[in-house]
């Protein structure tokens, strides 16, 4: 009986996750603000290509037909961090802690994006994608946090346990519209929560944060598709400008954000969990590079990879491809180990650390016609941005 119950629960979790990932149910009721609704209609997203049968095949492959390479065969190297180290660090340091979780020191205070410290990105503790590596630092060991910045409500970005553990040491939570209500429901004091719509700004102790557009979707279950906003974020410290994509497909919003807020010292752009069957909600490496150029970024830190198995590509493919593209398009790409310190002007850390784990394996660079589809030219030299400082080999 217990076994049957267990199977039913697993199946239920898989269905919830599959619905979140693949369903194209319309549910465009983003009734949060006229601005949001307008934005949503302007950038309607197709979650998966094809009709129901093809979507069912994609779902089947996702759950039952993955190659073994989607997870690392060995241990991913992690550089452990201590509170003392972090407190002693200079301003404008960045630490990737895994997936889209990035810790930043700005104006002598700590900020963190999409904190995800739990073992699984899932509504269930015992099923769903499990992380490849431990976080480089525990929430308990983290110094006090000035601001937690959330991009959207998907489980790999908005994690209940991480939020609740952080609550006691965090002054502010910045969220897109509607996501802050979830935090309040969980017990985060509403005085700590600031909810922003696209293009709205807020300032905290000299750090200016703006919620900016993204091409994605939201929802944590069957009945809440697109009920909360999703966003990218612009974060200005005293003398540095940061862009965080959250989750987003490639779209012309990056150019608009670059025009309004660029140039950026560092762009933290998602490239991972991409697939040709869901091209509009996540970026292939080629698109992340283009988004970085559109944003007028100097240093590109790819995120949303290397921690969870959320697609069909090998776990190291995003690193291989974006490193090669960075070289080819004269873009400074930094791929640190988890926990490795990155200065906002570094270019020489984490060089190909993932290669040693997967010897004898090469990523085949697909002959993509992405550039043609998007009418994109190589703009690196035209823009003169992103100097080819000792880039990746
Ligand atoms: Zn998402
Ligand atoms: Zn995600």
Image (cartoon, rainbow, N blue to C red):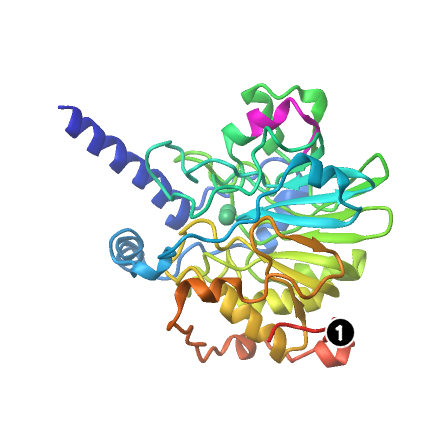
Residue nearest the viewer, comparing 271 with 107? 107
Residue nearest the viewer, comparing 359 with 250? 359
Quarter in which the N terminus is drawn: top left
Does mark 1 have its CB less than 8 Å from ligand 2? no
Q: Residue furthest left?
A: 1
Tell whether 7 sits left or right of 260: left
Tell whether 342 sits left or right of 25: right
Q: Is residue 200 visible?
A: no
Residue at 64% x, 22% y is 168
Residue 223 position, x and y percent, is 42, 34
The residue segment tinted magenta is: 163-176
Residue nearest the viewer, comparing 170 with 229? 170
Residue nearest the viewer, comparing 75 with 371? 75
Quarter in which the C terminus is drawn: bottom right
Residue placed under numbered mark 1 in the picture: 387
Residue at 86% x, 39% y is 206
Residue 234 position, x and y percent, is 73, 49
The quarter of the picture where residue 209 lies is: top right
Residue 292 position, x and y percent, is 67, 65
The reply to whether the magenta stretch includes residue 159 is no
The quarter of the picture where residue 312 lies is: bottom left
Residue 364 position, x and y percent, is 41, 76
The quarter of the picture where residue 316 lies is: bottom left
Circle 1 residues within 10 Å: few <14, some 14–19, many ≥20: some
Q: Is disc 1 placed on a helix, strand or loop? A: loop
The reply to whether the magenta stretch includes residue 172 is yes
């Amino acid at each position: 009986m217990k076994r049957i119950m267990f199977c039913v629960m697993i199946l239920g979790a898989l269905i919830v996750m599959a619905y979140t990932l693949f369903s194209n149910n319309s549910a465009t009721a983003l009734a949060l603000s006229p601005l949001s609704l307008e934005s949503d209609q302007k950038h309607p997203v197709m979650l998966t290509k094809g009709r129901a049968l093809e979507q069912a095949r994609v779902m089947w492959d996702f759950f039952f037909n993955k190659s073994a390479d989607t997870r690392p065969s060995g241990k991913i190297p992690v550089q452990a961090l201590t509170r003392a180290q972090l407190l002693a660090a200079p301003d404008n340091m960045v630490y990737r802690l895994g997936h889209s979780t990035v810790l930043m020191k700005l104006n002598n205070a700590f900020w963190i994006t999409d904190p995800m410290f739990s073992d699984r990105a899932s509504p269930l503790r015992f099923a769903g994608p499990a992380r490849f590596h431990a976080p480089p630092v525990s929430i308990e060991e983290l110094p006090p946090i000035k601001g937690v910045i959330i991009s959207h409500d998907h489980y790999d970005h908005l994690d209940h346990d991480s939020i609740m553990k952080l609550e006691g040491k965090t002054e502010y939570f910045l969220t897109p519209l509607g996501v802050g209500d979830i935090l309040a429901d969980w017990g985060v004091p509403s005085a700590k929560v600031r909810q922003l719509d696209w293009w709205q700004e807020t300032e905290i102790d000299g750090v200016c944060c703006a919620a900016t557009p993204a091409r994605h979707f939201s929802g944590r279950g069957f009945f809440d598709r697109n009920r909360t906003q999703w966003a990218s974020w612009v974060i200005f410290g005293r003398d540095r400008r940061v862009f965080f994509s959250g989750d987003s497909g490639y779209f012309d919003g990056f150019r608009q954000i670059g025009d309004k807020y660029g140039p950026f010292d560092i762009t933290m752009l998602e490239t991972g969990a991409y697939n040709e069957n869901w091209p509009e909600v996540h970026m292939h490496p080629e698109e992340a590079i283009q988004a970085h150029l559109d944003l007028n970024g100097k240093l590109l830190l790819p995120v949303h990879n290397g921690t969870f198995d959320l697609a069909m590509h090998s776990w190291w493919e995003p690193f291989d491809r974006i490193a090669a593209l960075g070289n080819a398009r004269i873009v400074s790409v930094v791929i640190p180990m988890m926990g490795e310190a990155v200065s906002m002007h570094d270019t020489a850390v984490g060089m190909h650390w993932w290669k040693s784990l997967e010897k004898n394996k090469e990523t085949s660079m697909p002959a993509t016609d992405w550039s043609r589809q998007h009418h994109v030219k190589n703009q690196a030299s035209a823009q003169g941005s992103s100097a080819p400082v000792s880039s990746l080999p």
